[in-house]
Image: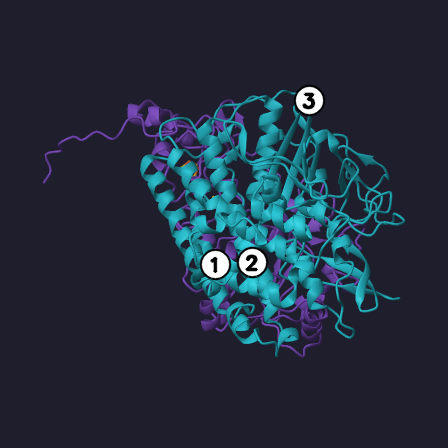
Amino acid sequence: MSRTVLGPFNRVEGDLEVSLEAADGQVSAAWVNSPMYRGFEQILQGKAPHDALVMVPRICGICSVSQSVAAAAALTNAAGAQVPVNGERAINLMLATENLADHFTHFYLFFMPDFAREAYAGTPWFDPVAARFRAIKGSATAEALPARARFLQIMGLLAGKWPHTLTIQAGGSARAVSANERIRLLSMIREFRQWLERHLFGDRLEAVCALESIDDLMSWATGDGPRGADLGRFVQLCDALDLHTLGQAPEVPRYMSFGNYPVEGTPALARGVWHAAAQRLEPMVSSDIVEDLSHAWMAGGGAAHPLKGSTLPDLDKADAYSWCKAPRWQGQVVQCGALSRQVVSGHPLARDMVARAGGNVMSRVIGRLLEIARIVPMMEQWTRALEPGAPFHASVSLPSDGEGVGMVEAARGSLGHWLVIRRGRIHNYQIIAPTTWNFSPRDAQGVPGALEQALVGTPVETGREMPVRVQHVIRSFDPCMVCTVH
Amino acid sequence: MNVLWLQSGGCGGCTMSMLCAETPDLLGMLADADIHFLWHPSLSEESGSEAVSVLDRCVSGELPLDVLCVEGSLLRGPNGTGRFHMLAGTGTPMIEWVSKLAARARHTMAVGTCAAFGGVTSGGLNPTDACGLQYEGATPGGLLGADFRSGSGLPVINVAGCPTHPDWVIESLMALSMGEMGAEALDEVGRPRFYADHLVHHGCSRNEFYEFKASAEKPSDMGCMMEHMGCKGTQAHADCNLRPWNGNGSCTSGGYPCISCTEPGFEEPGHPFAETPKVSGIPIGLPTDMPKAWFVALAALSKSATPKRVRVNATSDHTVIAPANRKTGLK
Ligand code: SF4
Ligand code: SF4
C-alpha cells in the first residue's frame, strides 16, 4: 500500500493537503493536513481586549462576521453585560447574511463545478449539468455572483462593509437602523428570496421548509417547478450517483450545534448534540470540550479545555502531521455544520436524512440548502421586529481580570472563542473553529477526525491522482482551512 | 492577459470582497478586458496536480505569466525555512513558489495589506515572521527585496486594504491590461494613486460633526469618531467614503472608526484601535496636512460655535434634532 499525497485543493478556503492509503479501489485510511499556520492566538496575547474585534475577523475572509460575533459574545460575557434586543436582531441579520451567502457561494462556486468535470463526460446527465455548473463558464456562476453581491448589500447597510466589519461590538451593534432603512432591508431580503425561489428551489421557501422526509424531498424534486431548478438538479444527481452513500462516517453519529440567533437570550436554532444512533438530544456545555495536541505541530501533548489551552508551534514534533488541533466533546469526535444545526434544532427532513444514512455528501449539501430556506423567513421577521429609536448597543465595562466565552454557529458549524483577561490585557485567547472539528487529525487514542473517517471507503479510480469522489466528500464539509488553525 | 492568483498568509477576504463587485457580470467584465485567470484558488476547476502543473509551466516559462497576484502575507518562518506554509501537495514552501514566479511575471501585484506590507498576520510578536512582497511594514524589503522590479520594470503594485475594495483590484487589473499603469500611477509605497490619493475623511457622512468637533463617545453614537474613538480617516489614504462598499456602506457609515487598513503597519497602532491617543487632551494623530496650533485654535473655536442640533445628535444613535425649516428669504 502506498500513500498518495493530494493538494492543493482549490475551491476550498485556504490550503489543504490530504494523504490517502487505498486498497481494492477504495480509501482505507486518510490523514488531513492544514499546511498553513499564522498564529492569531499568539498575536492576540498582550493586546487590549477590545482589539480582538479588529484582529479576529481577519482570521477568515469568508466567515469574518462569525468571528466578530464570537469575539463580541466573549467580551460581553466577560463584562457580564446584556445586548439590547435590537442589537441581537441586527447581529442576527449580519450573521445570517454571512452564513447564507456562504452556503450559496459553496453550492454554486465551490461544490457543484465538480459535476461538470471531464471525469463525468459521457454520462446521460452530463451536458446540461456542465452547461449550468462549469467553473467560471457555467450559466449558474454568471447568475449567482451578482445575486450574491446584491444580497451582501445588507452588509453595506448594517455592517459598513463585508468582510471585516467593526459594527459588531461588545454590548450590541454600533449601527442603529432607521425606519426607512428597515424597509430597505426588508426589500433586500425579499429580492434574495425571489432569486432563490426562481433559481435554486423553483418553489416557495415555505414549501422547502415543509419537506419532512427523504421521500418527500424525492417526490417534491420531480415536481414541475423544482425539477428545473438547482436543488432539483442536485437531487437528481444524488440519485444518479448514490451520493447518500458517499462520505459517511458511521463511527461519528454525533451532530453538534452551539445554537444560533438569540432573541432575548433564546436561540432560534437550539443548542445540543444529537446522537443519531440513540435518537437522543444531549446537552452541550463548554466544559465538555477539550483540544488534543497529540498530532498537531504544537508544543505539548495533552488535552486541555480551551480556557487553559496553549498554542505554541513545534514543527519537529514526532507523530504530528497538521497544524490543526483535535477538539473533542466528551472525548468523542463530533460533526458540525448546517446539517448538524438542522438536526439539533429538530427539522424532520434533517433528522430523517441522518437516521437513514448519517452525514454524507447528499445530506450535508441538502442541510445547507434547507438552512437557506429556513433562515430567510427568520431574517424577514427580525427585520420587521426592529424598533427604530430604541437602542442597538449598551455600554459595557470589562473587568481587569476575568474570563469570557463566546459560542456561535458559523456557516461551517460550531465556533468558540475563549478569552482570559489579566491586568486589563488579553492573557490567553483560544479559538476552536468549525473546520477544526471536522478536519481534526487523530487524537492521543489514535482516533481519526470526522473527515478522516468519512473518506474511508471512498472509491478511488486507479491512475487518477485527484479522484473526483474524494473531492465531493471533502467539499461536502465546505472546509475553511484558514479558520482551522488560524 | 494571463493572471495567476496565489493565497498565502491571509484570510482569503480580498477574494471574497472582489466577488462582491457591483456589476451584473463580473467574470464577463474581466473576460471582456482580456483578463484570464490561469488559476485562481476559489474559482478555477483545476485541483491538485493539475493546479501544480499550471504553476510549473509558469515557472518554466512555457505559460506566459502577465500578472502574478499574491493575496496574504509571506510566511518566512520558522528560521527562514518558510515551513509555516508549505504549498499543499508540493512539499515546497509557498515563499519559494512566489519568488520563482515573481521572477517570471511581467507584473507582480500584492492584493491586500497582508501581501503589500505584512498586515495583521505580522502583528504582535509576528510569530511566523510574516512580511509583504516588497515591504515589511513601511520598510522596503520584504520577501522580494527593495530592488526587485518585475519584467515590466515596475516594483510590486500594492493594492493595499484589509480587505481591498473590489474596484481597487479590478480597476488595477484593467489598467494593467490596457497598458495604462506606469510608475507615475503608484504612490511612494506602491499603491495605485487612483484610490490612494484620497483620504477616507473625504465624503464621510460625519463631516458636519467633524467641522464642529462634535464627537461620538461610544459605539453607535453618530458624531465624528476622530476625537475619542480612534478614527484615522483624516490620515488614511483611500477613497472609502467616495465609492461605496457593498452597495452603500463604508466603515464610518457602519458606525466604527477608520483604522487605516490601507497603511503600512496599521495592525500595530501603538494604542487600542478604538481609542484616540491624546497628549493633554489633544489627539496626537492630527489631520495629515494641519499644523497642531491651527488645529487647536480651530477646534476651540468650532466647539464654541457648535449648533445644539449637532451637539445633541453627536452622542445619540439616531437624529434627535432635525435641521430646522427656516425661511431664508432667498428665491
Ligand atoms: S469619523 Fe473619521 S472620517 Fe468621518 S469625519 Fe470624523 S475623522 Fe473624518
Ligand atoms: S475606512 Fe479605513 S479601515 Fe475602513 S476600509 Fe477604508 S481605509 Fe480601511
Q: Which residue is mark 1?
A: A200
Q: Quadrant of residue B16?
A: bottom right
Chain A image colour: cyan
> Distance of mark 2 from mark 1, alpha carbons?
10 Å
The reply to whether callout 2 and callout 1 are in contact (CB within 8 Å) is yes
Please tell me the numbered disc located at residue A423. Answer: 3
- Picture coordinates of residue A238, whole percent (x, y): 61, 63
Closer-to-camera residue (B82/A183) = A183
Chain label for disc 3: A
Coloring applied to the structure? by chain
> Distance of mark 3 from mark 1, alpha carbons?
52 Å
- Can you say whether B84 is above or below B40 in the image? above
Chain in purple colour:
B
Under mark 1, the amino acid is: Leu
Same subunit: marks 3 and 1: yes
Residue B213, can we see it? yes
- Residue at image position (52%, 40%) is B259
Please tell me the numbered disc located at residue A107. Answer: 2
Chain label for disc 1: A
Q: Quadrant of the N terminus of chain A?
A: bottom right
